[in-house]
Image (cartoon, rainbow, N blue to C red):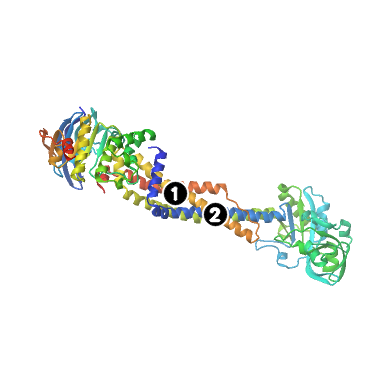
């Protein structure tokens, strides 16, 4: 079992007002799954992803990652898990304009103390995988949205993570670039990577194999996708 | 993340906004530059004054007639005639054979018309003792200096300063010629080597004659203007001064030091007080530069806080991909130190250039200036600039490390 969550709760207190963002979430995710966490804005899906991705801590409940009790970890230990266990893909790409593309991609390796020659090799390999070898020394601002997101995927993969979190990865992309991103994610999953996709669109969520539907801080339903969207065939059609 | 990595990152960040970075650095650049200039020019000035004083001689003790008190130097300095010091006092000091006294020279001075044939100059004459050449470190260019016998026998012999000799005799050899000081005739027996003008005397334009001859024949007095005592060992200066005081009090029948009718001074003592004055001045100027550095430090802190604000998204991302709080602190602290260190380096270079410029200007003005960049000023300036980075970088760096990664990621 990769991720085991039991009765997870998260409260935010703002002055006198306490908001119950997550009100008791329970599920398991196995290695190799492709899961969409779906829900409207304000449902708590982003908060859930932040907790699963070691960016935030739950208020109550249990979270085990690879059978390790995450709630007992210190801030520095959480940072270490982020550096080694997970990769993030964000809606707004979050590439640093002061660094070249290859430096951006290999940035996480700096924080897990990988020497620079190994970083370079790994970066070059991943750029090739996402088809951006010719852009290695570009400023990320000069890339198109699709290229940026492919670079961000490469960055998420750079540390060989146990799980990849994609937070609305197609939200800022046109449909063609969105397809490409989804195609890469599906390929990665076929190669054995665990992927957790966070989205508010049912259509996008259906690229995954399983959907956990969240409403008002609770799981509304949790089901296998019957008619899965497959990006591969579509791109072949568009060719 | 290694330190080297962090330094590389900070240089990349600085390069991104060159104008802003430069303006930020300006305060520190000016402050460090001021420290270097003050320390360099201060050291040069000190060296200059010391060499001037040393030229007079640090192994010399001067004795002036009249008492000096808390109100100031003896009246003789202001031209008021005080007759308390006599030729015999100097002779006594020599006779007592104090172990540390090498020799004693005595002086009377005045201005007179000096003439050779039709050529006339109004210039200063020095009546002195045979020991003059030793005490004043003067060499003879031509002929000879007068002897002890000539000094005691009121001989009418004269030794000319080099410039005066040229002006009076032009191309002619002055040795053996007769000249007149006022109306008294003298025989020229020697010419002194050129010495240059010091703070106290212009020997090259003077004529030197035996002291007793000057007293009797030209001035009509029996006191002397001052005497100079050359010691064998400079380290025994103070005890020598004491024994000179005792012996002078004895010969003047003085019981109470308050009634002294003479003043003793030593160049070495003047040197000490001059050093302390220039040091005080230097520290004052450094304190002024320090204010500029502190103001510059706040400027750096202000800009670093702004930079942290501009880079919230970056900080969030770095945290999301695994940066620990301490690594974020380290990154921003190193960035601040890189800024202040670079500023310090630029300040040191500019300060050195300005000090060198000052040196060239002083040379043009014919001042015997030396170009000194004290090593401690470089070390001090470097440490100060790194220190400012550390002190004023802590707050922005801490602020950056405390940002919530989720909030920071949302910030665009």
Q: Position of residue B346 (x, y in %)?
A: 48, 51
Residue neighbourhood size for the residue with mark 2, other residues' Cα within 10 Å, grouped as few (<14), some (14–19), many (≥20): some
Looking at the image, is mark 1 or mark 2 nearer the viewer? 2
Question: In which quarter of the view is residue B401 placed?
Answer: top left
Residue B280 in sight in this render: no
Q: Position of residue A198 (x, y in %)?
A: 18, 39
Q: Give the residue at mark 2.
A: B353
Q: CA distance from mark 1 to mark 2?
A: 20 Å
Query: Position of B213 compared to A27: left or right?
Result: right
Q: Position of residue B323 (x, y in %)?
A: 32, 38
Query: Position of A85 compared to B212: left or right?
Result: left
Local secondary structure at mark 1: helix
Local secondary structure at mark 2: helix
Q: Give the residue at mark 1.
A: B340
Query: Position of B17 compared to B57: left or right?
Result: left
Residue B296 in sight in this render: yes
- Above or below, A70 relative to B137: above
- Above or below, B186 relative to B10: below
Label disc, if present, on residue A197 of the rendered structure: none
Labels 1 and 2 touching (C-beta < 8 A): no
Determine the chain carrying the residue at label 2. Answer: B
Residue neighbourhood size for the residue with mark 1, other residues' Cα within 10 Å, grouped as few (<14), some (14–19), many (≥20): many
- Mark 1 vs 2, N-terminal side: 1
Q: Are marks 1 and 2 on the same chain?
A: yes
Q: Position of residue B410 (x, y in %)?
A: 24, 46
Question: In which quarter of the view is residue A84 placed?
Answer: top left
- Above or below, B311 relative to B202: above
Q: Quadrant of the N terminus of chain B?
A: top left
Determine the chain carrying the residue at label 1. Answer: B
């Amino acid at each position: 079992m990769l991720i085991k969550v039991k009765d997870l709760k998260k409260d935010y207190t703002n002055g006198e007002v306490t908001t119950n963002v997550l009100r008791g979430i329970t599920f398991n995710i196995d290695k190799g799954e492709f899961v969409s966490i779906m829900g409207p804005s304000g449902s708590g899906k982003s908060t859930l992803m932040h907790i699963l991705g070691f960016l935030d801590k739950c208020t109550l409940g249990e979270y085990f990652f690879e059978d390790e009790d995450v709630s007992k970890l210190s801030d520095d230990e959480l940072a270490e898990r982020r550096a080694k266990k997970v990769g993030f893909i964000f809606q707004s790409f979050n590439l640093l304009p002061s660094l070249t593309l290859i430096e951006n991609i290999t940035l996480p390796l700096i924080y897990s103390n990988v020497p620079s020659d190994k970083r370079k090799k790994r970066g070059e390999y991943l750029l090739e995988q996402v088809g951006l070898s010719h852009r290695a020394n570009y400023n990320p601002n000069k890339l198109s949205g699709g290229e940026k997101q492919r670079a961000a995927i490469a960055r998420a993969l750079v540390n060989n993570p146990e799980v990849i979190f994609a937070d609305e990865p197609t939200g800022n992309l046109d449909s063609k670039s969105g397809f490409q991103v989804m195609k890469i994610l599906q390929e990665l999953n076929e190669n054995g990577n665990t992927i957790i996709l966070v989205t508010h669109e049912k259509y996008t969520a259906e690229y995954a194999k399983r959907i956990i539907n969240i409403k008002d801080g609770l799981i509304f339903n949790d089901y296998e996708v019957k008619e899965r969207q497959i990006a591969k065939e579509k791109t072949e059609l568009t060719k | 993340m290694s330190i080297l990595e962090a330094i590389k990152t900070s240089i990349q960040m600085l390069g991104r906004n060159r104008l802003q970075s430069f303006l930020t650095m300006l305060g520190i650049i000016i402050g460090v530059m001021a420290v270097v200039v003050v320390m360099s020019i201060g050291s040069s000035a000190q060296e200059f004054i010391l060499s001037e004083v040393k030229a007079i001689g640090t192994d010399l003790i001067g004795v002036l007639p009249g008492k000096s008190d808390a109100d100031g130097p003896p009246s003789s300095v202001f031209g008021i005639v005080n007759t308390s010091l006599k030729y015999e006092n100097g002779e006594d000091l020599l006779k007592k054979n104090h172990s540390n006294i090498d020799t004693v020279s005595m002086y009377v001075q005045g201005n007179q018309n000096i003439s050779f044939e039709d050529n006339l100059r109004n210039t200063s004459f020095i009546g002195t003792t045979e020991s003059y050449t030793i005490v004043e470190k003067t060499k003879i260019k031509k002929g000879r200096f007068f002897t002890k016998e000539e000094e005691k026998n009121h001989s009418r012999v004269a030794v000319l300063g080099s410039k005066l000799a040229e002006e009076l005799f032009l191309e002619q050899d002055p040795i053996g010629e007769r000249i007149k000081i006022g109306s008294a005739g003298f025989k020229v027996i020697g010419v002194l080597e050129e010495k240059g003008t010091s703070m106290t005397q212009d020997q090259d334009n003077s004529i030197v004659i035996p002291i007793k001859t000057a007293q009797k024949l030209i001035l009509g007095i029996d006191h002397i203007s001052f005497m100079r005592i050359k010691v064998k060992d400079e380290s025994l200066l103070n005890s020598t001064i004491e024994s000179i005081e005792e012996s002078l009090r004895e010969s003047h029948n003085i019981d109470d030091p308050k009634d002294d009718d003479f003043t003793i001074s030593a160049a070495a003592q003047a040197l000490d007080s001059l050093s302390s004055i220039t040091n005080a001045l230097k520290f004052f100027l450094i304190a002024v530069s320090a204010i500029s550095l502190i103001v510059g430090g706040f400027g750096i802190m202000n800009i670093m806080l702004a930079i942290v604000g501009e880079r919230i998204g970056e900080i969030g991302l770095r945290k999301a991909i695994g940066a620990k709080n301490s690594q974020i602190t380290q990154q921003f602290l190193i960035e601040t130190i890189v800024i202040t260190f670079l500023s310090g380096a630029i300040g040191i270079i500019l300060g050195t250039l300005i000090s060198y410029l000052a040196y060239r200007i002083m040379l043009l003005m014919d001042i015997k200036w030396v170009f000194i960049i004290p090593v401690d000023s470089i070390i001090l300036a470097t440490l100060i600039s790194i220190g400012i980075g550390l002190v004023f970088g802590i707050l922005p760096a801490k602020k950056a490390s405390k940002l919530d990664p989720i909030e920071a990621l949302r910030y665009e």
